[in-house]
Image (tube, helix red, strand yellow):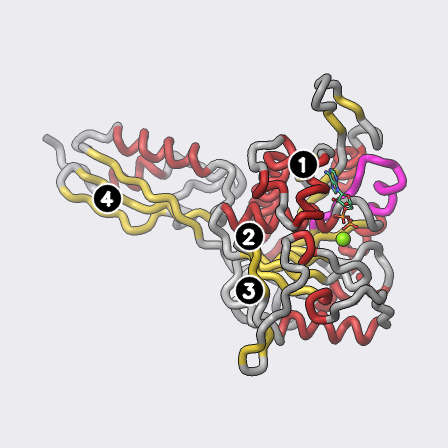
Amino acid sequence: MAQVTEADVYGALSQIIDPDLHKNIVRLGFIKDLKIEGGDVSFRIVLTTPACPVKEQMEGQARELVSALPGVASVKVTMDAEVPQGRGFGEKLAVQGIRNIIAVSSGKGGVGKSTVAVNMAVSLARDGARVGLMDADVYGPNVPQMLGVGNMRPDVNVNKLVPLEAHGVRLMSMAVLKPGDEPMILRGPILHGLVKQFLSDVEWGELDYLIVDMPPGTGDVQLSLAQLVPVQGAVLVTTPQEVAVSDVRRALRMFETVNVPVLGVVENMSYFVAPDTGIRYNIFGEGGGRKLAERYGVPFLGEIPMGMEVREGGDRGVPVVVSNPESPQSVAFRRVAEEVARQVSIEALKPELVVLGKAR
Ligand SMILES: Nc1ncnc2c1ncn2[C@@H]1O[C@H](COP(=O)(O)OP(=O)(O)O)[C@@H](O)[C@H]1O
Ligand SMILES: [Mg+2]
């Protein structure tokens, strides 16, 4: 019987094209630890994120193609991921160990920015990524409560704050440093310092993604945060309503001026399906997020329906993606998280020229 060679296996696998990076997975260097013992072939496929939406499909394809080679008796495929380091950290404060910082932003408050940030962070962690969540919404820091650790205080290790940990996510927030309900009245420079501290004085460890829940709006403070935090990309949250949409438009422009790539738009509270009748109500209008994304040429990352469980999960400190992972809302959150991870990979592996030349 014919003996299968490494070249045969690479040849077969090079037929698989990564749908986002438009190159074959051999050329992209995704195949690692190829071993051939007689007719037994094993290798790892190392993707750019554990939250890859086409993971299973690629695994199946690889198995099929290699199994079809003459001389192959068995195929062992291990799926793995290594999130690449994002670019654009050069001129900004570098944070050791953090590969990608993703800002979650919105034109105004109350559109579900924190809810999206929390469920996205937990989804990515459940997919196997190392995830941190920084609550930079100094006006209404409620992320610890949403993750059920509102009453905990962080430990200090030598000179660094140790992040809290909840549902697999490392977390730091103004709220855990400053107990009580008094509103924070902070001016730009002080805020600047605070955010800097959250990056440099917190022991984040190794992170694939640090999600930052930004303050709402597009004032000077948001602008300086976007400049200070070495953001790999921004996710904009909106509701379908026209007013919210026009606020997001302003946010899009803001990120453009500070050269932060906009990863896309998430539409939250898109519609409500009555559990008793199954009738769909477009409470805040329809299709605003998608239209906005199309108009500005940024990806549409998905829509999240309304659901009582979403709010209850936030109030109880157990995000809906944990309490009811099969609900339509959870499925939507998970899809958004995968889409964001995908856009981050695309940004990270884009040819350098595109970024330097400010082609966007
Ligand atoms: N898809 C949704 N379905 C139901 N309630 C939601 C949804 N998204 C957010 N909420 C609720 O709306 C309120 C505002 O959300 P929040 O995430 O705090 O907004 P923001 O951070 O933009 O101010 C919260 O009570 C939250 O639980
Ligand atoms: Mg919030």
Mark 4 or mark 1, whichever is nearer to me: 1
* Magenta stretch holds residue 267: no
The residue labelled by disc 3 is 98
Q: Does 285 appear above or below 130?
A: above
**First in sequence: mark 3 vs mark 1:** 3
Which amino acid type is shown beneath numbered disc 1? Gly
- Determine the residue positioned at 54% across, 61% down: 99
Q: Does 327 appear above or below 115?
A: above
**First in sequence: mark 4 vs mark 2:** 4
Which amino acid type is shown beneath numbered disc 3? Ile
**First in sequence: mark 4 vs mark 1:** 4
The residue labelled by disc 4 is 6
The residue labelled by disc 1 is 302
**First in sequence: mark 3 vs mark 2:** 3
Q: Does 177 appear above or below 39?
A: below
Residue 196 occupies which quadrant of the picture?
bottom right
Alpha carbon distance from label 3 to label 2: 19 Å
- Determine the residue positioned at 76% across, 33% down: 270
User: Any atom of ligand 1 within 8 Å of the CB at mark 2?
Assistant: no
Alpha carbon distance from label 1 to label 2: 23 Å
The residue labelled by disc 2 is 167
Over which residues does the magenta segment extend? 235-248
Q: Are marks 3 and 2 in contact (CB under 8 Å)?
A: no
The one of 120 and 188 positioned closer to us in this rendering: 120
Alpha carbon distance from label 4 to label 1: 41 Å
Q: Secondary structure at mark 3?
A: loop
